Image: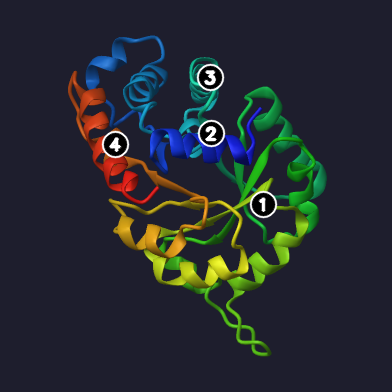
Amino acid sequence: MMTIESIYKNIQTKKSFLCVGLDTDINKIPNFLLNFNDPVFEFNRQIVDATHDLAIAYKPNTAFYESRGYEGWLSLERTADYIKSNYPEIFLIADAKRGDIGNTSKMYAKAFFEEMEFDAITVAPYMGEDSIKPFIDFKNKFIIILSLTSNKGSADFQMLKNCENKNYLYEEVIKKSKQWGTAENIMYVVGATKSDKLKKIRKIIPDNFLLIPGIGAQGGSLKETIDNGKNNKGGLIINSSRGIIYAGNSNNFAEKARQQALILQKNMSENV
């Protein structure tokens, strides 16, 4: 069973906030892996085995698996099962960005929380509370609400201002959604490229975990993210995907991935 306290404990034990994003593209993995029955799973397995002592979380982006149909779903299920069976202390996030009317959300929640035993799932909040509640109803599971993302297009809606109170839309989303649960089951996505907004966000949600993508390849600053986003227990899960998993493209790809993960973990350890 994964709890917020077990995540805090793992951060302290490993001196790390690191989440490794398993955005595994079969067209980018080393060619020799194509000889395996499930090349994507084998790639993930070796990455996980090489980095599990440095990472507190793994985050498969489900689009990379769904795009391959049945075989992709098998790779995702095998990856999730391997991580939970061998490294039960790891926080396992389905980066699925789901969010739909209640009955549909309930089925999504069953798929990821019951069938594949993920600990958390990313969700889009723009259809409101009834689209999120079915996920929250699952005990000892977490939802991670998209609030302020790293992409350029986030300015189209997330940065719109409320004419009455001058709050940005992403602030309204956070303030409203924090009423739907507690820090024990709700986390938030805040892009590392928006680190200047983290201090204000922390005032709204001082106790919730923040999942921070955008370090490395997308240009986010690790130091600024930690300085502005950390709370008194840590409260950060900092993701790196391409910068770690594609650090090498030969037989030693897992070793290269470990080297990059170790650089991040050492930088993080000074601030845990």
Instruction: Indicate which disc residue 183 carries.
Output: 1
Is 272 left or right of 9, judged from the image as shown? left
Specify which label sits upstream in the sequence, 4 or 3.
Answer: 3
Specify which label sits upstream in the sequence, 2 or 4.
Answer: 2
- Marks 4 and 3 sit apart, C-alpha to C-alpha, by 26 Å
Give the number of the mark in front: 1 or 3.
Answer: 1
- Marks 1 and 4 sit apart, C-alpha to C-alpha, by 28 Å
Residue ID at (52%, 36%): 9
Which secondary structure, mark 2? strand
Counting every numbered tag in the picture gives 4
Q: Label 1 is placed on what type of residue?
A: Ala
Q: Label 2 is placed on what type of residue?
A: Phe
Residue hosting label 3: 74
Give the number of the mark in front: 1 or 4.
Answer: 1
Q: Label 4 is placed on what type of residue?
A: Ala
Residue hosting label 4: 261
Give the number of the mark in front: 4 or 3.
Answer: 4
Q: Label 3 is placed on what type of residue?
A: Leu
Asked if the residue at tag 3 contacts the one at tag 2, i.e. Cβ–Cβ closer than 8 Å, the answer is: no
Specify which label sits upstream in the sequence, 2 or 3.
Answer: 3
Q: Quadrant of the N terminus?
A: top right
Give the number of the mark in front: 2 or 3.
Answer: 2
> Where is residue 63 shown, x and y percent of the image?
49, 39
Which secondary structure, mark 3? helix
> Where is residue 224 shown, x and y percent of the image?
34, 63
User: Is 213 above or below relative to 118?
Assistant: below
- Marks 2 and 3 sit apart, C-alpha to C-alpha, by 20 Å
- Marks 2 and 4 sit apart, C-alpha to C-alpha, by 16 Å
Which secondary structure, mark 1? loop
Which secondary structure, mark 4? helix
